Image: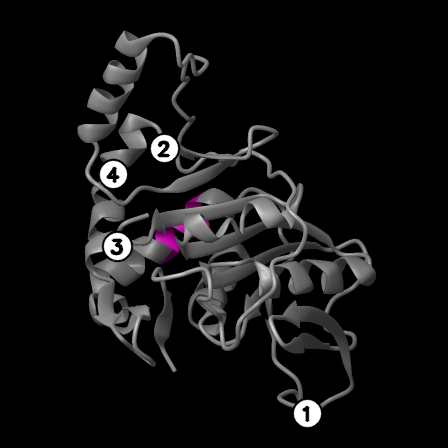
Amino acid sequence: MMLLRSTASANLLRSNSLTPPPASTTRTVAATSPTLAVAPFKPSTPKYLAALRNYRSTLPPPRCSVSESDSVQVQKMAAEDAQDPRLARIASSIRVIPDFPKPGIMFQDITTLLLDTQAFKDTIDLFVERYKDKEISVVVGIEARGFIFGPPIALAIGAKFVPMRKPNKLPGKVISEEYSLEYGTDSMEMHVGAVEAGERALIIDDLIATGGTLGAAIRLLERVGVKVVECACVIALPELKGQEKLGDNPVFVLVNAPGA
């Protein structure tokens, strides 16, 4: 299924509702160029607030999102990045479908991005440009849409691709990691021997919402001695604070969901 998750409410799931893990902080991750320096927030200076609102109003949404360490704040990317025409094309190619699969859910459909060959290429190119010189040896794709974006990135940067799946989907011996849902648990699995201790991994998924599956993927890789360099997603739902809940693990996102 190639439908993305909604921005409608904090009950949004990957396939079930997730109970958010304890909140933490995240590291700042630049998009495709250095982030814009922003003066400290001073609520007692109305002129500062007005200037900041005027600046933001000149930027067409959505934006590449980055996480601010310690302040737990999602920043706007630098103005020069916001003007990258590839980001605008990617954002406009994602279709929003209301009330699917149930009323109140607003799914974002990446099948329309895949139909736009230029937008699809731009998506892959942006990730490749970021990771080609980071000595990544393995790209891990999260079921299922991570399987779409992960393999071409892996081929382009000279890394192997490893699928990470839900239970009973992989045929060989597996290692698994549980994560919490609103009512119960689920888990991510990976073939034993797919990765080796000391390797450097990039985790790819289409979207970050509450961060449950990405957190499980990180823990699973770290258990076998793999260094997780970064998590990368096409879309973020920042109101669900998934980036914050991954602790010190950096997350790189191309665009925020509409309305975020």
Q: Judge the density around disc 3: few (<14), some (14-19), many (≥20) Cα neighbours within 10 Å.
A: many
Q: Is residue 85 above or below residue 201?
A: above
Kindly check if marks 1 and 2 are in contact, taking CB atoms under 8 A apart as contact. Answer: no
Quadrant for the N terminus in the image = bottom left
Closer to the N terminus: mark 4 or mark 2?
2
Q: Secondary structure at mark 1?
A: loop
101 vs 171, nearest the viewer: 101
- Pinpoint residue 23: horizontal percent, then vertical percent: 64, 46
Select label 2 or label 3 by which is in front: 2
Per the rendering, the mark at residue 171 is 1
Give the overall secondary structure of the magenta segment: helix
Per the rendering, the mark at residue 84 is 4
Closer to the N terminus: mark 3 or mark 4?
4
Kind of residue at badge 1: Pro
Left or right placement of residue 245 versus residue 129 in this view: right
Q: Which colour scheme appears in the figure?
A: one colour
Specify whether residue 106 is in view.
yes
Kindly check if marks 4 and 1 are in contact, taking CB atoms under 8 A apart as contact. Answer: no
Q: Which residue is mark 3?
A: 90
Left or right placement of residue 10 versus residue 139 in this view: left
Left or right placement of residue 34 versus residue 251 in this view: left
Q: Which residues are magenta?
A: 124-129
Q: CA distance from mark 4 to mark 1?
A: 42 Å
Q: CA distance from mark 1 to mark 3?
A: 35 Å
